[in-house]
Amino acid sequence: MDEIYIPISEFIQSLEELPYAQELSALGVFLTFLILRSLFARIIISFAKKLTLRTKNTIDYDLVCALENPVKFLFVIIGASLALQILSLPESWLDITAPTISALYTYCLFWALFCTIPPITKAVFSLGQRMGKAVNEDLQQFFIRSVEVIVLVIGGVAILEQWNINVSAFLGGLGLAGMAVALAAKDTVANLFGTLTIFTDKTFQKGDWIETPHVEGTVEVIGLRASKVRTFAKALVNVPNAKLANSPITNWSRMTNRRIKMTLGLEYRTTAQQLETIVDALRDYIANDAKVEAKGPVAQMVHLTHFGASSIDINLYYFTKTTNWEEWRQIRSDHIIAFKRIVEEAEAGFAFPSQSLYLEQMPEETA
């Protein structure tokens, strides 16, 4: 505390000893740069925005908007630096103000770099898309966040270097604490590699309906550490990406067709001729429905399959062209009604679980 108190006392004493003209000059320089900052924002930035709005692309406008605040802050740093030079501070304070100003310049530089990452990467990805090498949105966000983290880390190290803090020696001196941090970060690193695996393998993307042993729902966010899945019960589940990358995943959104599979149980009193008529009618109906897929490797199968406990079973197996769940449900509903009509027109009926009870009459006892 004494070490801090002495320089502050020297600073106050030095200010009291300074001529008022020198203090006013320093204040005037600082206020001048604040005014220049305001004029720069109103005139130069506004003119640059209007000029870039006339161009065909948006990267120049986005860059101007991104650099606006860092450049405005630069005026404050320059004003403070010149004002401190005018004040002729004590030597003990120069050891504090000099690295502080240098750290602020470094901060401003990396702030500007950080702000330009989104517009520059956006322009690069747009160029790749025009060249036929499109990158999905989730991978773009992953790349942007990764670059932002790198810039933040390098910027933090550069700022510490202005204070002559050896980051390498500091990290090396952590010893056991560093090992503990490394062990604690093991899961984080695993999740980062899991995220990279998801993107490179293109397992799923935002908006896909996925099913794993742990969760089923629609992917809303693919983050650096975890993905957010909205279940059909409208609950939001956060799943670590390492767990997703190591689990079997069914991506239902990549279905080429949607399957309809059902069994019709007919009464045992249905004749063989009625069975043939019903099966042929079912096949014709499915084959002539424009909503049912008839091309490619998909199958259309209608067969008598079982003599069940209380019914003769007809199994239907085919695919719709649409993969939309609501449309699929409507098609299935229409087909159920149509299949019932076919059975009724053949004068047959649907079976239901039943049991036959046989009563045997005992002979009367003779007297």
Image: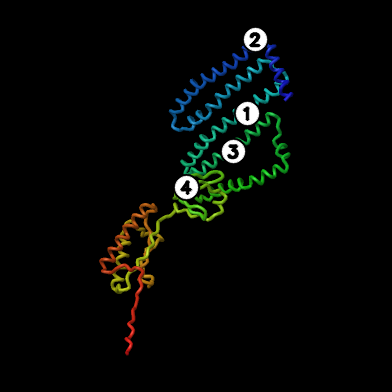
Inter-mark Cα distance, 3 to 2: 47 Å
Inter-mark Cα distance, 1 to 3: 16 Å
Check disc 4 and give the amino acid type: Ala
Q: Would you name the residue on which mark 3 appears? A: 149
Image coloring type: rainbow
Q: Where residue 244 appears, x then y in whole percent? A: 54, 51
Inter-mark Cα distance, 2 to 1: 32 Å
The nearer-to-camera label among 4 and 2 is 4
Q: Where residue 168 appears, x then y in whole percent? A: 70, 37
The nearer-to-camera label among 2 and 1 is 2
Check disc 1 and give the amino acid type: Thr
Check disc 3 and give the amino acid type: Val
Q: Residues within 10 Å of mark 1 (few under 14, many from 20)?
A: some
Q: Where residue 82 appears, x then y in whole percent? A: 63, 18
- Counting residues from the start of the chain, the first of labels 4 and 1 encountered is 1
Q: Would you name the residue on which mark 2 appears? A: 20
Q: Would you name the residue on which mark 1 appears? A: 106
The nearer-to-camera label among 3 and 4 is 4
Q: Is residue 350 above or below residue 71?
A: below
